[in-house]
Amino acid sequence: MPGMKLGGVEDGVVHVTRGLAAGRWSRRRGFERVGSVPGSDVVARFFDTPAIGRLLSRIIGSVTTANLWPIGGGRLLATIGNELFFSVDQGRSWSLVHTLPESSGPMGVLPTAVCQHEDRVYLAEYPLGDETARVIVSDDGRRWSTYVSNSDVRHFHGLFHDPYTGSLWGATGDTNEESTIGRFIDGEYHPVGGGCQTWRAVDLAFTPDAVLWGMDCSYAPRIDILRLSRDDIPSESADPLVDQPTPEPVGAVDAPVFYAETIQSDRTTWVVFSTASTTGTDSTGPETNGIGPKPVRVIAASRQSGFKRWHQLVAVERSATLGTVIPAVPTANAYAFLDTTPDGDLLINPFNTRRNHGKMIVRSPSSFEEEQRLSIYVDK
């Protein structure tokens, strides 16, 4: 059976997928199936077939084949391959509402691609070919139109609502020139900064006085965690070529950073990041690049430390497969998906890992400081 993958949390309900099955998770009952997303993607269908899926998992590992997002009022979105689906009944039934670029990967877009902002829903398409990078928008989840087209970047990695300013942010990749973090202003994307791998991010974390992210780069000499003070963010009318700010490195990790979460505890604000265990080389980097297999890590730092003291919450190795011993056999990446419960607990969902694959780990912020600090998380 495919591993469970975290989708999103809304009104106390944890929405998840297991292969093409959509459902919900709770501590008491575990995974409960609600319905099935009717994706036609061949890879997703193979992995959703029990016998074939088990065989492929042993060879290349578990592949992420579906995304799911709650968008309010019992409505859900899901992507599989180049198809976007919509449900009005908590995932019991689905309808195809949009076709994504043909070159989209097995799960269509990144889990960070959907954002609710000012009563509208935005989705960042994720072409891997020559299609124009687009952000599309919908008022109801069913009818979609183009919000922004950008031919200067390969694709958008994610869209993010800043709860402190009400702004809509985005991140793009993947080459130096294509890597930016910016805001959407009057229907246009305006980079705050870019031009190098420092600005290549998958997810952003917002705090009252800063924006934080980790570099999504497997070949940089150092993979930094960065903090951009709100005082240094240029005004909306600033020229990004002249007024580009310099983010402050506040730590370093040994693998690309993918997902982020901000948690408010009784005493302070915590930022949590998870790294990915990636395989192969980066097609947009040098001919020889890549750092080899690294553990999937989940780390946290508090506002009290200026986000400079990082505590390791989880470290798990990528799943052992045939591809880990035979270089010619491809292997799947491993991740730890993140979200927060209404009670302020952190949900950690390792995927394609040797331990806790497809499980849900629940951690309270009160326990974060008890965790080990490692030398790779460097104070500046």
Image (spheres, rainbow, N blue to C red):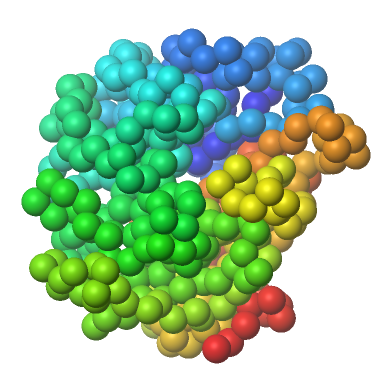
Quadrant of the rendered image containing residue 11:
top left
Q: Nearer the viewer, residue 360 or 44?
A: 44
Evaluate whether residue 277 shows in this view.
Answer: no
Task: Report x, y in % for residue 137.
Answer: 20, 34
Q: Is residue 28 left or right of residue 254?
A: left
Quadrant location, the C terminus: bottom right
Residue 41, above or below 319: above
Q: Position of residue 353 (x, y in %)?
A: 72, 45
Residue at the right extreme of this rendering: 325
Query: Where does residue 193 sit, x and y in percent of width and height?
Result: 33, 66
The answer to which image quadrant residue 244 occupies is bottom left
Above or below, 149 against 252 in this view is: above
Instruction: Name the residue at 17% across, 22% down.
Output: 143
Q: Exactly how many numbered labels are in the figure?
A: 0
Question: Would you say 264 lies left or right of 88 here?
Answer: right
Residue visible at 33% across and 29% down in the picture: 77
Residue at image x 55%, y 71%?
224
In the displayed structure, 141 sits above or below 257; it is above
Relative to the observer, which residue lies in front, 145 or 369? 145
**Residue 99 visible at all:** yes
Residue 17 at x, y percent in the picture: 51, 30
**Camera-side residue: 141 or 89?**
141
The N terminus - image quarter: top right
Relative to 351, is 165 above or below? below
